[in-house]
Amino acid sequence: MDRPNTTPHSPRVTPPSFPPHRGEGGEGAGRQCSSTHSAPWRWNKGGLAGLRGRLCGMALALLLASPAQAIDPLYQRQMERLTEIMGSLYFLEPLCETGTEDWRQQASELIELDEPDDDRRQRLAGAFNTGYTAFSRLHKHCTPSSREALTRLLDEAQKLARDIHTRFAE
């Protein structure tokens, strides 16, 4: 096996050049690549274009085999946060005996108006449940911190609803 000499005074080994793309003529079109290695490099049948075709075919097969995923609307994160807040309010308002709003019904109507696909619907419902669960674990009785959380959540929900409507309503 011949190895190139790596002393500073030896000539540099140059890598083989790529063959031209199909349809491109030029010097060296269709010929083997040259190298200073003992075994000359040869392009297999199809060359780089054949490899590119095989890679594209494999990528296409992977895409077709994977389930299609819908693209979320730009307001998805805000909607998830809004439904999470609604879940928290659904727990806190009866606990502190304030308000008569049915936040579960409001969240359900909001989700229906948005007409989400199944994945988004599950994420929105999950956000509602997360908000409910988070506050039900921490708050067993109405305390001053519960009332403060209720006030802040109502303010945030109002701002989010206004922002979503202003930026994304048709």
Image (cartoon, helix red, strand yellow):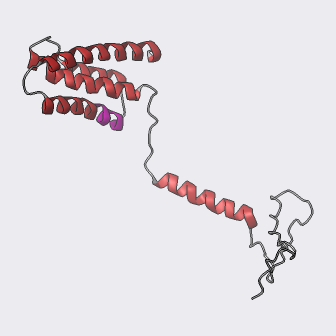
Q: As displayed, is residue 131 above or below residue 156?
A: below
Identify which residue, 89 or 48, lies in the foreground. Answer: 89
Query: In the image, is residue 109 above or below residue 72?
Result: above
Q: Where is residue 77 shown, x and y percent of the image?
A: 39, 29
Q: Residue at x 46, y 35 (%)?
A: 71
Q: Is residue 49 above or below residue 147?
A: below
Q: Residue at x 28, y 25 (%)?
A: 83
Question: Does residue 42 appear in the picture of this structure?
Answer: yes
User: What residue do we see at 74% from left, 88% from top?
Assistant: 1
User: Relative to residue 32, is residue 47 drawn left or right?
Assistant: left
Magenta-drawn stretch contains 154: no
Q: Residue at x 41, y 15 (%)?
A: 163
Residue furthest to the left in view is: 141
> Residue 105 location in percent, x, y?
20, 20
Relative placement, left or right, of 122 versus 96 is right
Residues shaded magenta: 118-124
Q: Residue furthest front?
A: 8
- In the rendered image, the residue lying farthest to the bottom is 1
Choose between 53 and 38: the one closer to the eye. 38
The answer to whether any part of residue 170 appears in the image is no
